[in-house]
Amino acid sequence: MGQAIADFHQKGGAKLLRVFSSQFEEDEIPVKQLFRGESQMPAIERKALEMAQGRILDVGAGSGCHSLALQQSGKEVLAIDISSLSVDTMLSRGVRQARQVNLFDNSFCETFDTVLMLMNGSGIVGRLENLPQFFRRMKQILRPGGCILMDSSDLRYLFEEEDGSFAIDLAASYYGEVDFQMQYGKIKGEPFDWLYIDFQTLSYYAAENGFVAELVMEGEHYDYLARLQLKGDNS
């Protein structure tokens, strides 16, 4: 994805960014979509940008579209991504603070008022079993009164029957745990886990780990925006 982002920025276009999964048919990500302006963003993303306050951490920032929108609103934001090419692109596009950082790297110990995780931000967690580690990490970097703004989708619609019921195998692994692999030209990335999580399950894990989940907004197709804050932290 980093190479696709760099090519689009430098050349004004990019090859197909192909996406493979053992659960789904081959798909592609329109690289141009990663460069959209605020007016082109879904309502859920615009709402999250409006709610973000204080010092903001934009996780998995990609091309920096959310960080640029926040800057234009006069907000302070640090954009992080694991791709050096993405970081170089963000800096070239005018993102003032962008760094190559893995959210789960404990050597990254700065603190923030808002942690922003958009474009199915829950995906970075990978699997349900990683949620306790994720919430421990959030306790380390959130300032008092701070919050996480995260969007995700409930994939249950993929299992919907004609009569409106859902044929989900409860004995199998959680239906929102997906494996992906990306290919751009001749570059093929390593497979990785990606988590789509329904709000009820997110709320349960949040409560188990000392957080309160608030459903801020629902989208048009099983997607939603959640606000997560430490229990009793209303400062």
Image: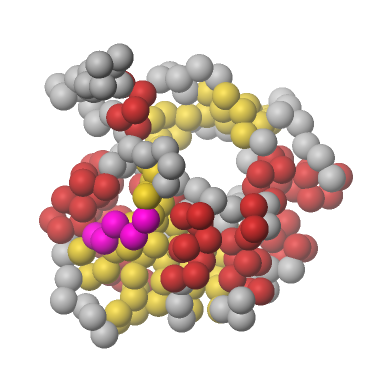
**Taking 142 as reference, is 101 left or right?**
right
Relative side of 193 to 173, left or right: right
Q: In this view, does 74 lie above or below 131?
A: below
> Residue 156 occupies which quadrant of the picture?
top left
Q: Position of residue 41 (x, y in %)?
A: 59, 53
The quadrant of the image that shows the N terminus is top right
Q: Which residue is drawn at 26% across and 61% down?
A: 214
Residue at image coords 44%, 71%: 51
Q: Give the range drawn in magenta.
A: 213-217
Colour scheme shown:
secondary structure
Give the answer, above or below, for where 113 lies relative to 184.
below
* Residue at 43% in and 42% down: 220
Q: In this view, does 142 lie to the left or right of 75?
A: left
Per the picture, the main secondary structure of the magenta-coloured stretch is strand
Location of residue 165 in the rendering, given as x and y in whole percent from the top left corner: 22, 21
User: Is 108 located above or below residue 105 in the figure?
Assistant: below
- Of 179 and 66, nearer the camera is 66
Name which residue lies at 29% across and 81% down. Answer: 144
Confirm whether residue 99 shows in the render: no
Magenta segment: does it hold 142?
A: no
In this view, the residue farthest toward the right is: 11
| Front one among 97 and 151 | 151
Q: Is residue 138 visible?
A: yes
Q: In which quarter of the image is residue 126?
A: top left
Q: Give the quadrant of the C terminus.
A: bottom left
- How far across and down, in percent of the image, does residue 212 sit? 20, 64
